[in-house]
Image: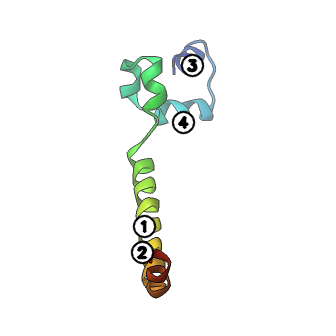
Amino acid sequence: MEEYQMAKKYGFYDPILNKRLHLYPSDLLKVDEKDAIHSADTKEFRGIVIGISLAALLLSGLIIFIFRKKVVLMLK
């Protein structure tokens, strides 16, 4: 972020630079670099991970339900 701000300060004007400056969360300016690496995890990303996990759980449950008689025989 500091590099982007310095580039803008010294006269580099580009639409990509402005987009990146607007996409960068302002809360991360107050965090040191080690924490900033781990804070890239956004709510949207967490939602996607939770959704995929739930879908996998439901799919495995459906497979076990469909083949429940064979699964019971395998467990004995």
**From the viewer's perspective, is the residue at label 4 or at label 1 nearer?**
1
Mark 4 vs mark 3: which is more N-terminal?
3
Identify which amino acid the numbered label 4 is placed on: Lys
Where is residue 33 shown, x and y percent of the image?
47, 18
Look at mark 3 in the image and give the residue it sits on. Answer: 8
Identify which amino acid the numbered label 1 is placed on: Leu
Q: What element carries label 2?
A: helix
Q: Is mark 3 on a helix, strand or loop?
A: helix
Mark 3 neighbour density, 10 Å: few (under 14) some (14–19) many (20 or more): some
Look at mark 4 in the image and give the residue it sits on. Answer: 19
Mark 2 neighbour density, 10 Å: few (under 14) some (14–19) many (20 or more): few
Where is residue 64 shown, x and y percent of the image?
45, 78
CA distance separating discs 4 and 2:
43 Å
Look at mark 1 in the image and give the residue it sits on. Answer: 57
Identify which amino acid the numbered label 2 is placed on: Gly
**From the viewer's perspective, is the residue at label 4 or at label 2 nearer?**
2
Q: In this view, does 2 lie above or below 76?
A: above
**From the viewer's perspective, is the residue at label 1 or at label 3 nearer?**
1
Mark 4 neighbour density, 10 Å: few (under 14) some (14–19) many (20 or more): few
- Pick whichever, 32 or 12, lies toward us: 32
Q: What element carries label 1?
A: helix
Tell me whether circle 2 and circle 1 mark residues in contact (CB < 8 Å).
Answer: yes
Look at mark 2 in the image and give the residue it sits on. Answer: 61
Where is residue 42 shown, x and y percent of the image?
42, 42
Residue sitting at 44 percent across and 60 percent down? Answer: 53
Mark 1 neighbour density, 10 Å: few (under 14) some (14–19) many (20 or more): few
Mark 4 vs mark 2: which is more N-terminal?
4
Residue sitting at 54 percent across and 36 percent down? Answer: 19
Q: In this view, does 16 lie above or below 67?
A: above
CA distance separating discs 4 and 3:
12 Å
Residue sitting at 46 percent across and 20 percent down? Answer: 34
CA distance separating discs 2 and 3:
54 Å
